[in-house]
Every structure is written in structure tokens, then in C-alpha cells.
Image (cartoon, rainbow, N blue to C red):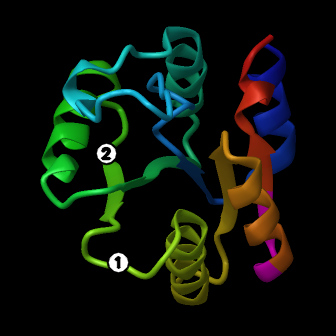
Amino acid sequence: MYFVQKIKDLIKDNETIIFVDMDGVIAEYGFKEKLDFREKRPLKSNIEVLKQIAKFPNVTLHILSICRQDSQIADKNYWLDIHAPFFKERTIISKESYPNKASKELKLAYLQKFKQENPNVKLILIDDDNGVLKYIWENLEGIKLIQDSSLID
């Protein structure tokens, strides 16, 4: 598969953390849909590609997702347990806890702190939101950004 080989070439033998957005990348997402995360349709082809990458010895897959309400964190974890249990590392941030912050700001703050605490680890972010990707590209050096459409062969 193209994407699996692309990741192999990108990481080489480096210890790598791949942060994966959840909504729109591994779970179907619609802007005007009910926010019942337990019932979201899994994007099985993307999940299968990531499952292969999770087997790489020097790679850790890490969910980095945003939700609107604190109560939705449990729903997202439940969904991951059912549809993508190989994601052992999970960070799900609620906007309810940070009411004046946009998703892109929350992700940037998390990634900046993570990078500072793990300076020798290669970081990759896979996201479906071009606004988030652009914002992180403009504000954080040393992270590889991948649009989720690259997962599809």
C-alpha cells in the first residue's frame, strides 16, 4: 500500500509518534449531524491502513481529537474501544473545558507541549481539517503534516 510505504520511508528508524484526528479520519463526521459519537460509522479503509502502521516497532499511534462537551470524551473512548482498539494513546480535549479556544488552538497547544517534552521523537499529524493543518504548519516547526486523503490508495 502506498501510504504504508510512505510512512516507512518518512520515519526510517526514528522513534515516531503519529497523532491521528478522529472525526473525519477514522470516524465519519458531518457538520450538522447529531453528536452521538458512539454511533459514528467507522471509516474502515483508513482504520485498516493505520492498523498496519501500528505494528511498526518504532511507531506509536496517538488519537488527538476535540469534542464540544466533556461528556463526549467517554463516548469517543467507547467508540475507539470498539472500532480501533489498537490506539492505546488517546488525548481527547473538550471545548467545554476551554470555551474560548478553537480546535486548531487546542491541538497546537497540545502538540507544542508534547514536542517540548519529547524533543527527540519524530512527530506526524494526520488530520482532515485543512484549517487545522495550515495553522499548525504556520506555528509549529518540526512536525510532518498529512491530510487524511493520503490514506486512500
Camera sees residue 69: yes
Numbered circle sitting on residue 79: none
Residue denoted by label 2: 88
As displayed, is residue 117 above or below residue 65?
A: below
Q: Nearer the viewer, mark 2 or mark 1?
A: 1
Q: Earlier in the sequence, mark 2 or mark 1?
A: 2
Q: Residues within 10 Å of mark 2 (few under 14, many from 20)?
A: few
Residue sitting at the far front:
32
Residue 109 falls within the magenta-colored stretch = no
Query: Would you identify the image quadrant in which residue 84 lies?
Result: top left
At horizontal 87% and vertical 39% (from top left) the residue drawn is 9
Q: Residues within 10 Å of mark 1 (few under 14, many from 20)?
A: few
Residue 142 falls within the magenta-colored stretch = yes
Q: Amino acid at mark 1?
A: Pro
Residue denoted by label 1: 99
Camera sees residue 141: no
Q: Amino acid at mark 2?
A: Lys
At horizontal 26% and vertical 32% (from top left) the residue drawn is 37
At horizontal 85% and vertical 76% (from top left) the residue drawn is 138
In the rendered image, residue 46, in percent from the top left (x then y), is placed at 58, 19
At horizontal 82% and vertical 68% (from top left) the residue drawn is 137
- Locate residue 109 relative to residue 140 in the image: left or right: left
- Locate residue 137 relative to residue 98 in the image: left or right: right
Look at the image and tell me in which quarter the N terminus lies. Answer: top right
The secondary element bearing badge 2 is classed as loop
Give, as a single range, the part of the protein colored magenta.
139-144
In the rendered image, residue 82, in percent from the top left (x then y), is placed at 21, 21
The foreground one among 10 and 149 is 149
- Alpha carbons under labels 2 and 1: distance apart: 27 Å
As displayed, is residue 6 above or below residue 16?
A: above
In the rendered image, residue 56, in percent from the top left (x then y), is placed at 58, 36
